[in-house]
Amino acid sequence: MKNVLKYSVCGLLSACLLGSCNDSKFLEEDPETFYTIDNVFSTSEQVDQVLIGCYSHIRVMMCMTEESNTAFVFRGGNGTDMFDVATIRRSNRFNDYSILNSTTEVFYINYSHWYQLISKANLALYAAELPQISWTSEAEKLYVMAQARFFRAFAYRNLGELYGGVPLVTEITTTPRYDFERSSRLETYQYAIDELEAILNDLPETTGTMGRLVRGAAQHNLCQLYIDKGIALEEDGKGGEAPAAYQKAIAYGNDVIDGSVYSLTTERFGSRADEDPVYYYATEESMQTPEHLYSAAGYPVEGNLYWDLFQEGNQNYQEGNKEAIWVAQIDYDAYKAEDGESKLQYSRSFGPVYRDPMSAHLNSAMEDVGGRGIVQVTPTKYTRDLVYEGKWGSDLRNSEAVLRRTLLGNVPSSPYYGKPVPWSVIYKDGESKDAVDGSWTQCFPISCKISTDKYRGLDAGENRSNLFRDEYLIRLPETILLRAEAKMRSGDNAGAADDINLLRKRAQCDYLVKASDVNVDLILDERARELVYEECRWNTLLRMGGTVAVDRIKKYAYWDDPRTTLTKNFNLWPIPQVVIDTNKDVVMEQNPGWN
């Protein structure tokens, strides 16, 4: 049986509701016990349950197990250079700056989520120090506290990248406050840095429990935070201090990449190491017969070692995946028994819809068309095509096994039945603009990160909406790309190119980058190739500083909304207006451009 982190949180106050009841004394005001934060905790296991709540909170935020527009923006990248919305989702557009402002709900819900995580972490730290808690060892206590401090630092890293300086809340709050003061963006980053550096020795290099935090996760975040700090120093007019920050980022990247237990996957591995993805061109299960079966092996399939990374059972370090640093746990058995959130709604939310615009040739919600997609976000032309144009096209990450572009007609009356449907047909070349927009935004190549040829649970009522594999929160290639960025910002373009080429060689690319290629755009392009559907693209764009986010959104958005409405430069989201309005005892300034 797998030793896996379970996301179930005990009800600490349930004792208040248990026990026998004497009806004659029901109305007498003589309570035997008042439960408070100080006495509700009695065991170390209860403190650990607060941490379980933190892990669960992260899973909801980072793995999009709650279906909402906030998730489509933060986790799905809606409104960035990489993702936009389909014609059928125009009401959820997130790059029309005539309607985006500091009262937009997404900004507030995301902001609140991070402070909810901070609140849980602060509670765990407070409870861990209560005198009645008995620990099996000092190391056990230190590890519990290290995890809590990691979550708090992780929250402030995200808040700093998205909102800049925010109030630093480091203790539990038991009474209402209206006097929070903002730190600076630099101070927010520094607080997160200090927290993570303080706990490095209390985090294990590896752990037997899948999903639990390890030292590499903190080192990875420190690498990113020192880059963030360097950029913030430059924007604050302290460019002379930035090189030292970038060198620290490189050092932490070295610790993970060269000085730890991680390495890139370079050969087939895991639960399907001897398989290729296979599909039926079929609009219903009765048509899934041998004569309708085809394999991506019929097309370029060399990407299988990369495809292996995203097959169920292959995500954890403990399962043999040496590039897995931190992984959220998705447990199908728990999902069926009690935890309805333990799923990845990727096929549903990120998946294309061929059944309407292409119903004459491609229809249904079967595996061959990516499952039961409802296209909440759509990859832009940049994401699906431009990053693979010309010399960039030979790349395992662009192979049929990984990014499936060959779709066989599955409608018997179609002239393309059992044959590849040309993209000129899929995109309705020559038809009306509405027809072209509808097909372009609803139909696109299908990534193995959001779909599968073997959906689990169909015999138990599942419907090709969800994946039940664990999900990466940190994977070694992102650390490599962070170190490349830090080297670039330090003036070492040759070293940055070497790092990028570690990934390009693994992807068997024909073209390896040169020092002269290296710039911010190249870093962002390689992140798009390697981390599509994995990274939080808003964080990446905003932390770059300057006008990087604005420039790329205006350049690559599918719709013209930002090109006609984005008239300000920004690299921060607005502080939610409700936060400013309710902080009545201290004036909280709004971020530039969002007043």
Image (spheres, rainbow, N blue to C red):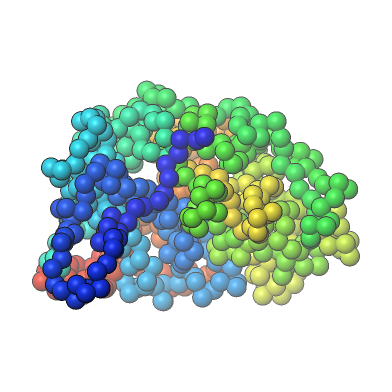
Residue 405 in the image: state x and y as whole percent: 71, 50
- Quadrant of the snapshot with the C terminus: bottom left
Q: Residue furthest top?
A: 259
Q: Is residue 339 left or right of residue 416?
A: left
Instruction: Please name whichever residue, 471 or 532, is drawn nearer the observer in this view of the structure.
Output: 471
Instruction: Please name whichever residue, 268 or 468, is drawn nearer the observer in this view of the structure.
Output: 468
Q: Is residue 594 left or right of residue 413?
A: left
Residue 217 in the image: state x and y as whole percent: 36, 37
Residue 536 in the image: state x and y as whole percent: 43, 52
Q: Residue 105 occupies which quadrant of the picture? A: bottom left
The answer to whether residue 204 is seen in the rendering is yes
Instruction: Please name whichever residue, 58 or 569, is drawn nearer the observer in this view of the structure.
Output: 58
What residue is rendered at 54% in x and 73% in y? 90
Q: Residue 512 occupies which quadrant of the picture? A: top right
Q: Is residue 580 above or below residue 155?
A: below
What residue is rendered at 50% in x and 53% in y? 342
What residue is rendered at 28% in x and 60% in y? 19
Residue 357 in the image: state x and y as whole percent: 72, 69
The answer to whether residue 572 is seen in the rendering is no
Q: Is residue 583 above or below residue 281?
A: below
Count the labels in the image: 0
Q: Is residue 454 above or below residue 574?
A: above
Q: Is residue 148 left or right of residue 28?
A: right
What residue is rendered at 35% in x and 66% in y? 109
